[in-house]
Image: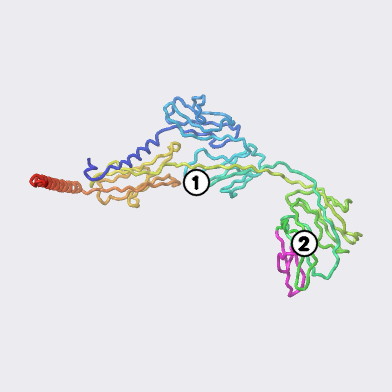
Amino acid sequence: MDGAMYGLQLPFPIILISLIGQLGSAARPVVTFNPDWNKIHIGQYTTMTCNMEPPASLYYWYRNNNELFTKQKVLAFYAGPEHSGNYKCRTSTGGTSEIVTLSVINGPVILQAPLYIYEGDNISLQCYSPSRSLATQTIFYRNNRTIQKSTTNDTLQLKSTDLKDTYKCAKQFLLTAISRTYSAETTISYTENSRTVPVTFTPDWSKLLTGDDITMTCHGGNNVTYQWLQNGTLVAEGQIYTITSAQVGHSGIYQCRTSHGDSLPFSLEVSDGPLILQAPIFVYRRRDINIKCHSRPEYSAHGIRLYKNNDFIYGHLHVFSISFHDGNYNYSGRYRCEQVLSRNEYITHTDEVSLHVRDLFSKPVITTKLYPVTKENNMTLICDTSLSPIRQGTKLQFAFYRDGREVQKFSSSRQYKVQSTQPKDSGNYSCEVRTPTNSVIKRSEELYFQIQGENHKKDYKTVNIIRLVLSGCVLFLGCVFLIHHIKTEVITPSKK
């Protein structure tokens, strides 16, 4: 009646929301895992517990909606493929838990996350492997970018601000050190002396491995323009041409072209293999030369042997010097080196995880016990929120605001009381809820409360009396008009 008399309606939607929040926080069982991971490796010992306060007398377990033959509070087992699935528990009091998923994996690497993750949590991820002792390195990725590498640590610590990202981990395993004999060949032929523009090389090798560097210098004199050609195509200008981290595409026939003349064309070969036999680019008569059996740095090399035209000539050295003064008057021929190369072989396994972050508590709603409120009444505002059933022990703090300004600082009380209200207490009220560490904070929508003045009831009564008098006058005039119309119809004869 008061609401109708004041021309106001009771805030039924607010009361309904409050009731829903109270129903949502009703006691229900909660399933927890030990170890607390959403994914486990096959063979790991695992327990599931149906937590309920107060404890129930009987517990009913379900996997994929099929009832399990047990009435115990705890399930314990060594995980097998048959244990993967969606679990829930029900108690003799009638409460049923939410569904939780357990994944049992028989893989080389598993990225494990906690079963329940809430906003504001700091958590750990574990990159687990049953062969962890054989792993040489653990790598964690955030959004496909490397963020942590370690040879000893297989866990990653995450702050609450990082939980919305995607994570992946990888483990590298050393299989074995594989040894194999490789061979490489080269042919040496003399370069005839000519009056062409000379070119020098650092290093002076006609063959390179991919990733090697080489610098070429053209000696054409002063006030000369320089161009470098590869297979007849211009690739650079200037006296010096450097190839950094050579690739197979750098192979070809090169030549330096100047405004005073050209150099001799020369061949450069870039190999992506494990082993090459290197010789100088230009080989002149009556000059000493070196030959090098060159392998990639990731290989361990031993057992080197050098052959010329299939005849063994040197061993145990990776650089062979051939001196003109030793009576070697003829360098030309086909050379071959053999080398035993060993390399550690690695294999990498990866796994990903998706983090589902839950609400620690619901968005708060502000309500009141009495509305409308008149002058000099007492008003109590309530900040209503619901904690997750799994985190019922979390302590929350509450603050209240009017028109955006704080009227009650954060405290453990979810109520704000205004004694002997005045019209100045009218305004848009809201409340805020946070954790003691301020890791999670949420604010309600604003709700307008009007404090009525002491003459407000009298004003409404006066208005209603005036409305009643006016309605009576309108009714009276309507009756007079109707009577007049009837009399006119009776007195006036109808025309035939």
Asked if residue 378 lies left or right of residue 54, the reply is: left
Q: Earlier in the sequence, mark 2 or mark 1?
A: 1
Image quadrant containing the N terminus: top left
Q: Secondary structure at mark 1?
A: helix
Query: Between residues 395 and 61, which one lies in front from this camera angle?
Result: 61
Q: Which one is closest to the eye, mark 2 or mark 1? A: 2
Whole-percent x and y of residue 303? 82, 48
Mark on residue 160? 1
Question: What is the crowding at mark 1: few (fewer than 14 residues within 10 Å), some, or many (at least 20)?
Answer: some
| 172 lies above or below 306 | above
Whole-percent x and y of residue 398? 37, 45
Tag 2: residue type? Ile
Asked if residue 354 lies left or right of residue 287, the reply is: left
| 242 lies above or below 441 | below
Q: Is residue 20 visible?
A: yes
Mark on residue 488? none
Q: Which region of the structure is painted magenta?
A: 215-244
Tag 1: residue type? Ser
Q: Residue at x 73, y 50 (%)?
A: 298
Furthest residue to the bottom?
223
Q: Which residue is mark 2?
A: 253
Q: Main secondary structure of the magenta part?
A: strand
Query: Between residues 432 and 26, which one lies in front from this camera angle?
Result: 26
